[in-house]
């Protein structure tokens, strides 16, 4: 059987998370906003418990946690939700990077059409954006800087720690898309300074279809983010619509498990990365890593196999490994990765690149067997 090595797209659900969710679906089926009966009250208790679990993982107050349908929605609210404040304060300058997820880039592109002024910085070949370059672009009317914590295609960690401290001094709002780091870089996120942060539960072994927008309070006040959808007052009006109690419970449980196990998980991820590096090193294949590996998270690599078309490699090794060559959201039709393009990687190398992403429970023996077969196929396809 093929091994699943596309965990940056979505992780398998943890059985303990699924058990909690099943219990909620079967026994706690009320609406968390029904005030008039015990079923509603029980559902509300589950939601508030999940909020505490998320807050504990992130080291924040639970009143700063807002449940959404996932990172795409969280990113949209964090950015679009600032429009009213931007108009009131006449701050309409936004800075972001060319390697953000499309849910950030496309949202900011839409803001540009509405008259916002946008600066987009490129990373270097390292895959990392330069914090100073971003800070140099900050102006009197800068509303927002939006930079991801870890890039989904390369695994490269961005300098959000430096940016957080400096942007706070400059009084500029800072949004961090932490979709690929939440539950993994736990202490780093706890020490980060930011105003808004997004993540999706399904990237940390929780269910698909639920995520979080964190709004950090400053002197008891939330950042000036407004709802972008209209309806009920759920999630303080930030995200109207019936709260999906079982999904939220699953999100909370995934966060609690991540908090309990991240140190051990981190060791497992690192060990798998070492194994992969060794396999590649010993294989005799002509390859190189995309992005500076000293800044790369231990769960991802993006590799260029010289002279191998990645589409051919993925098809030929499909029975051994499920990997990808771009983010799932843009991979329906093949076009060269915009992330690798922005890094300045030549097109022929982009076309020869694949992303491999694993999770702590990835079986090491299967990993070695199947990845070895993929590497052999890569060698045979090289021209
Ligand atoms: N941001 C990043 C960095 C991601 O990797 C993803 C998912 N690929 C998203 C945002 C969007 O997450 P979702 O599809 O769960 O909304």
Image (spheres, rainbow, N blue to C red):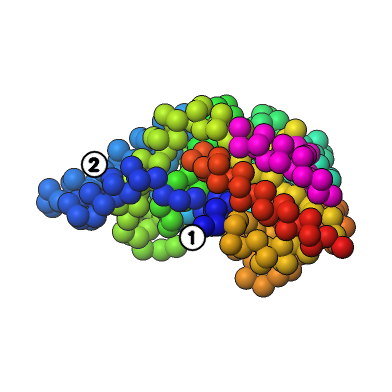
Residue 197 at x, y percent in the picture: 54, 43
Label 2: few (<14), some (14–19) or many (≥20) C-alpha neighbours in 10 Å: some
Residue 200: x and y in percent read 49, 50
Horizontal side of 96 relative to 383 (left or right) equals: left
Per the rendered image, the range of residues in magenta is 271-293
Front residue of 277/342: it is 277
Q: Which of 307 and 227 is in front in this view?
A: 307
* Secondary element at image label 2: helix
Q: Disc 2 designates what residue?
A: 45
Q: Is residue 336 left or right of residue 15?
A: right
Q: Residue shown at 51%/38% (left/top)?
A: 360
Q: Mark 1 points at which residue?
A: 228
The label on residue 198 is none
* Residue 330 to residue 86: above or below: below
- Ligand 1 closer than 8 Å to label 2 CB: no
For residue 175, say whether it is visible: no
Q: Quadrant of residue 130?
A: top right
Number of on-image labels: 2
User: Residue 71, percent across and down?
Assistant: 52, 53
For label 1, count other residues whose C-alpha is less than 10 Å away and answer few (under 14), some (14-19) or many (20+): some
Task: Locate the C terminus and report the quarter of the image it occupies.
Answer: bottom right
In this rendering, the label closer to the viewer, 2 or 1: 2
Is 35 displayed left or right of 80 in the figure? left
Task: Please report the residue visible at 28 percent of the width from the left and 45 percent of the height from the top.
Answer: 20
Q: Is the magenta stretch mostly helix, strand or loop?
A: helix
Q: Does the residue labelled 1 lie within 8 Å of ligand 1?
A: no
Name the quadrant containing residue 168: top right
Q: Residue at 44% of width from left, 62% of height from top? A: 229
Task: Tell whether position 77 is magenta.
Answer: no
Question: Gap between marks 2 and 1, in whole Å?
Answer: 26 Å
Q: Which of marks 2 and 1 is nearer the N terminus?
A: 2
């Amino acid at each position: 059987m093929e091994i699943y090595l596309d965990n940056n797209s979505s992780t398998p659900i943890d059985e303990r998370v699924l058990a909690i969710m099943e219990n909620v679906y079967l026994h706690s089926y009320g609406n968390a906003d029904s005030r008039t009966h015990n079923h509603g009250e029980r559902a509300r208790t589950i939601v508030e418990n999940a909020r505490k679990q998320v807050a504990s993982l992130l080291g924040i107050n639970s009143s700063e946690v807002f449940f959404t349908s996932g990172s795409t929605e969280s990113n949209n609210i964090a950015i679009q939700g600032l429009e009213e404040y931007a108009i009131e304060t006449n701050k309409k300058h936004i800075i972001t990077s060319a390697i953000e997820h499309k849910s950030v880039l496309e949202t900011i592109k839409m803001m540009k059409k509405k008259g916002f002024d946008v600066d987009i910085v490129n990373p270097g070949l390292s895959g990392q954006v330069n914090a100073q370059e971003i800070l140099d672009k900050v102006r009197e009317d800068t509303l927002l800087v939006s930079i991801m914590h870890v890039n989904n295609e390369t695994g490269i960690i961005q300098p959000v720690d430096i940016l957080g401290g400096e942007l706070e001094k400059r009084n500029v709002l800072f949004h961090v898309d932490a979709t690929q780091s939440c539950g993994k870089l736990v202490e780093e996120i706890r020490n980060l300074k930011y105003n808004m942060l997004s993540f999706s539960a399904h990237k940390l072994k929780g269910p698909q279809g639920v995520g979080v927008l964190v709004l950090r309070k400053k002197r008891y006040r939330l950042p000036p983010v407004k709802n972008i959808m209209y309806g009920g007052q759920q999630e303080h009006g930030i995200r109207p619509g019936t709260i999906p109690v079982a999904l939220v419970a699953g999100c909370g449980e995934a966060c609690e498990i991540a908090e309990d196990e991240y140190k051990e998980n981190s060791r497992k991820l690192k060990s798998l990365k070492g194994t992969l590096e060794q396999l590649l090193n010993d294989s005799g294949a002509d390859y190189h890593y995309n992005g500076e590996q000293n800044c790369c998270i231990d769960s991802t690599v993006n590799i260029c196999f010289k002279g191998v078309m990645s589409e051919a490699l993925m098809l030929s090794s499909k029975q051994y490994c499920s990997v990808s060559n771009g983010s799932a959201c843009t991979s329906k039709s093949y076009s060269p990765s915009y992330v690798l393009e922005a890094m300045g990687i030549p097109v022929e190398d982009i076309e020869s690149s694949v992303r491999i992403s694993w999770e702590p429970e990835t079986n090491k023996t299967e990993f070695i067997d199947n990845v070895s077969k993929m590497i052999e196929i890569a060698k045979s396809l090289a021209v």
